[in-house]
Image (spheres, rainbow, N blue to C red):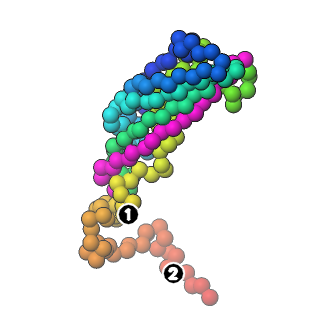
Amino acid sequence: MAQAPTTIVDLSRLSLGHGEGKRLEMPVALEPFELAGQTYKPEPWSPTVRLEVSRPSNGFAFRLQFPVHLEGPCMRCLEPATLDLEIEAREIDQAGTDDPELRSPYVEEEELDIGRWAHDATILALPTRIICRPDCAGLCPICGESLNEANPADHEHETVTDPRWAALKDLKLD
């Protein structure tokens, strides 16, 4: 999978004093996401994100917000599916501590990698299944036909016993 594009915010150039904050809006390019062997493309590929940066006593606090629209195949029937999400993520980075809970993995030497953070925040916000509609019936496990369009009465298959289990039908249980 390709790396997320890099968009860096130089925190030292914001010139924030303790207790101050700034709000920035900027486009951030998102690479397509690959999930379960399928590709989901963001549309637009470069959404405008809102970044709020504040400077508490020792470090930075961040809040990231942006909408994202994804397009790709349904995980049940492979028909086109879309998903609209509102992404919201928060991070803190406190200087001079070894506590990993107080250090952001997206800040290095007063530079915030907002592109990688936006990519990771989107991945974390995704549902476990991206489907074309809530009542998607998926594909028939026998013939592979979409069950969304098939009439259940017309789509019945004779059940065939797996030959590996055939010997079990001769068992006599009392």
How far from the left and from the top, in percent, is residue 60? Answer: 62, 22
Placement of the C terminus among the 4 image quadrants: bottom right
Q: Residue at x 41, y 24 (%)?
A: 26
Q: Between disc 1 and disc 2, whose residue precedes?
A: 1
- The dominant secondary structure in magenta is strand
- Residue 75 falls left or right of residue 57: left
Q: Is residue 123 visible?
A: no
The amino acid type, in three-letter code, at marker 1 is Asp
From this view, report whether residue 67 is shown above or below residue 60. below
Q: CA distance from mark 1 to mark 2?
A: 40 Å
Q: Label 2: how many residues lie within 10 Å, few (<14), some (14-19) or many (20+)?
A: few
- Residue 169 lies, with reference to residue 60, above or below; the image says below
Q: What is the span of residues highlighted in magenta in the rendered image?
A: 77-96
- The image shows residue 122 at horizontal and vertical percentages of 47, 37
Does the rendering let one see residue 160?
yes
Q: Is residue 34 magenta?
A: no
Is the residue under label 2 in contact with that under label 1 (CB below 8 Å)? no
Q: Amino acid at mark 2?
A: Asp
Residue 116 vs residue 76, the one in the foreground: 116
Of tags 1 and 2, the one toward the viewer is 1
Q: Which residue is depicted at the point 36% across and 57% down? A: 133
**Residue designated by label 2:** 170
Is 9 situated left or right of 82 in this image?
right
Instruction: Determine whether the residue tagged by mark 2 lies in a helix, strand or loop.
Output: helix
- Pointer 1: what residue? 135
Give the residue drawn at x 60%, y 30%: 91
Task: Determine which quarter of the picture holds residue 140.
Answer: bottom left
